[in-house]
Image: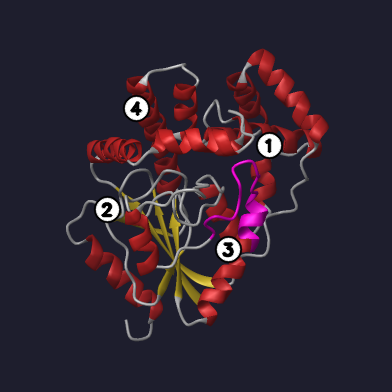
Amino acid sequence: MRETVQVLFAQADLLQQLDHPGSDLGFGEHAVGDQRLGDDLLDPEARAERRKRVLEDDLHLLAHAPHHLLDIRDPTEAYSAAAFCEDARRLMADIVARGKLPLLVGGTMLYFRALLQGLDDLPRADPAVRQKLERAAAVRGWPALHAELAQADPATAARLAPNDAQRIGRALEIFQLTGKPMSALLDRAHAALPYRVLQLALIPSDRAVLHQRIAARFDAMLAAGLIDEVKSLRQNYALSADLPAMRAVGYRQTWAYLDGETDLSGLREQGIAATRQLAKRQLTWLRSWPGAVVLDCLADDLDAQASALVSRHLDPVRA
């Protein structure tokens, strides 16, 4: 069976550097990861649609380590877990065929799970049901629908924020169409990934350091032109605040700033708070992730530990 390495981590710059000769980098999550391995990796939810601008710093990284599934969607386009799995499997097969090692890097646990275990045949989106849910949300608010989801599908509700309109809506839509919770359908997933996967979970031993890095990461995004980026996207695409791409951490708060709903200080505070909430949910997933080898991302010998694990994974006989 072919090998691959999966690196799971929460928000901020937990990966200082991940170099492996002959490796191609896989996927990350929106506005997450290391300053180097952040939202310009292969993105499971196509959140980082940076079609107009790539930082010089990122250009150096892209030249050093190939990244995939960048620049594949406009911010107005949706991107499903099924589409991601199809794209990722195709790219992984190509990487392996070239004699290289796919590295799957990021923090989107649902998409990792879909890729590793396969997706069950979930029902297609139903516009009528979706519109009904959106009307209900307009009257009652998404937190109320989140509470409703907690009754129907507590496992899915537990990993979603109360205002995560896209995922709450999809989970309720699936429940209304099938009468079954989405978590139960995902548990019946099939067509598991045909690779022998080493799963490394990078979890900080000091939560305070994680929070410091989250703040530094968001400040770096602001300094790198986040506001101008969102302003340019608004000028060049027919966007609205409820589109999935614009609900990403950082984009959502910047949109509110451009609409005059908050000032620059509020944008920063809200963006950092939202990132910390996202990191908390990701860490909850990581700690219960089956088969993951937990590493302290703050350890001085992190590189040595990870390298040893990868070496044993790639050559178990000699190890």
What is the three-letter code of the residue carrying label 2?
Cys
Circle 1 residue? 170
Alpha carbon distance from label 3 to label 2: 26 Å
Q: Which mark is residue 297?
A: 2
Q: Which residues are magenta?
A: 69-86
Residue 138: % across, % down: 67, 17
- State the residue at coordinates (27%, 56%): 16
Tell me, for residue 268, which label it has, or none.
4
Q: CA distance from mark 4 to mark 1?
A: 29 Å
User: Toward the viewer: 177 or 56?
Assistant: 56
User: Is residue 81 on the magenta stretch?
Assistant: yes
Dot 2: what SS? Answer: loop
- Marks 3 and 1, how far apart at CA: 22 Å
Q: Identify the mark nearer the N-term, 3 or 1.
A: 3
Residue type at tag 3: Ala
Dot 3 or dot 2: first in sequence order is 3
CB of mark 4 within 8 Å of CB of mark 3? no
| N-terminal-most mark, 4 or 3 | 3
Q: Which mark is residue 88?
A: 3
**Mark 1: secondary structure:** helix
Type of the residue with mark 4: Arg
The Cα atoms of the two marked residues, 4 and 2, are separated by: 25 Å
Residue 215's place in the image compared with 1, above or below, is above
Mark drawn on residue 287: none
Q: CA distance from mark 1 to mark 2?
A: 34 Å
Please, what secondary structure does the residue beneath circle 4 have? helix
